[in-house]
Image (spheres, rainbow, N blue to C red):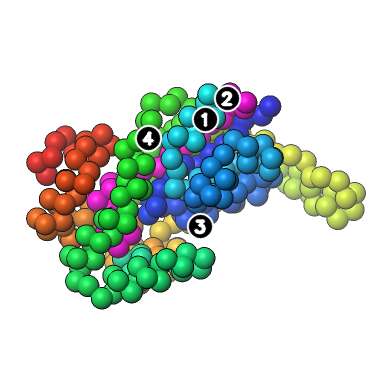
Amino acid sequence: MKNKFFFFGHHKCATRYIINILNIVNKYLELNHIEFHNDELFNSNLENSIIQKNLDFVYYTNAKYKHITKIENNNIFNYKGFHLIRDPRDILISAYFSHKNSHPVNEWTELKKIKKKLNSVSLIEGIKYEMSLLKENLIDLEEWNYTNPEIYELKFENLIEKPVEIITDIFVFLDLVDFHCVDTSIKALSKELINSISHKLIKKKPIKTKKIPLTKLLNAIIVNDFKVLSHGRNNGTEDNLSHYRKGISGDWKNYFNNDIKEKFKKDFPNLLIKLGYEENNEW
């Protein structure tokens, strides 16, 4: 059985950015993909859903490691994936502004109540309230196994500093990028032509491409750059009403006072140390 692929993400960790790129790649590679943003969508049995739906690439965007453990124990299929985390303090601030202003309600009916609450209290009280909402999400980060050789671990802070290098590294790890195939070559153009003909005339499934040419991957990264998604703003230029609010790391320092710090340390005493964001709790 061929490899299954995973993107493991968490709330407010550049999820939309990554998924935008993955959608371009998976469309080109004709990989069957899906997003699961909570356990209910796969009935708490990720492995069965993958098999039943014949999935090639899964975006598990509020990931809990216990479901990966089940896959490892049963060993029904091979897999490779990547896992993206972020400084939990920045997750908190990003979630606060998102839930207060920009996050769409859609089917998340509870968000209406959250928005109302956040817009009725002070900034400090709102951040404390948001912290209580995120407790389970942040515990998921602490309970993650960061030593799995089949999962490429990366941090948001490195991603925004070197997006082209990091994302290329991800697809090298997944063995899905072709450094030798250039789209402007006769070979690539011929393949696209054959695919087009097979769609319109032969009515057969197009030729399956196992890897994406580096040029196509780079283009997917460029068209999803923060400046493009934020309609011209540079990283660090803030728009509190935008889903792509600021695009930087360390923004928590602008909002954490002593009360918020103490509550965070009390609720998550070992989290920052385990994730490598602090050496101790003296921050």
Write down the residue under mark 1.
Answer: 70
Q: Where is residue 263 in the image (x, y as percent from the top left)?
A: 16, 52
Categorize mark 3 by other alpha carbons within 10 Å: few (<14), some (14-19), many (20+). few
Categorize mark 4 by other alpha carbons within 10 Å: few (<14), some (14-19), many (20+). some
| Numbered circle sitting on residue 74 | 2
Does any portion of residue 78 appear in the rendered image? yes
Asked if the magenta segment contains residue 92, the reply would be yes
Q: Indicate which label's residue lies in the foreground, 4 or 2.
A: 2
CA distance for labels 3 and 1: 36 Å
Write down the residue under mark 4.
Answer: 144
Dot 2 amino acid type: Asn
Of callouts 3 and 1, the N-terminal one: 1
Dot 1 amino acid type: Lys
CA distance for labels 1 and 2: 6 Å
Q: Is residue 137 left or right of residue 35?
A: left
Q: Helix or strand or loop: what does disc 3 sit on?
A: helix
Write down the residue under mark 3.
Answer: 223
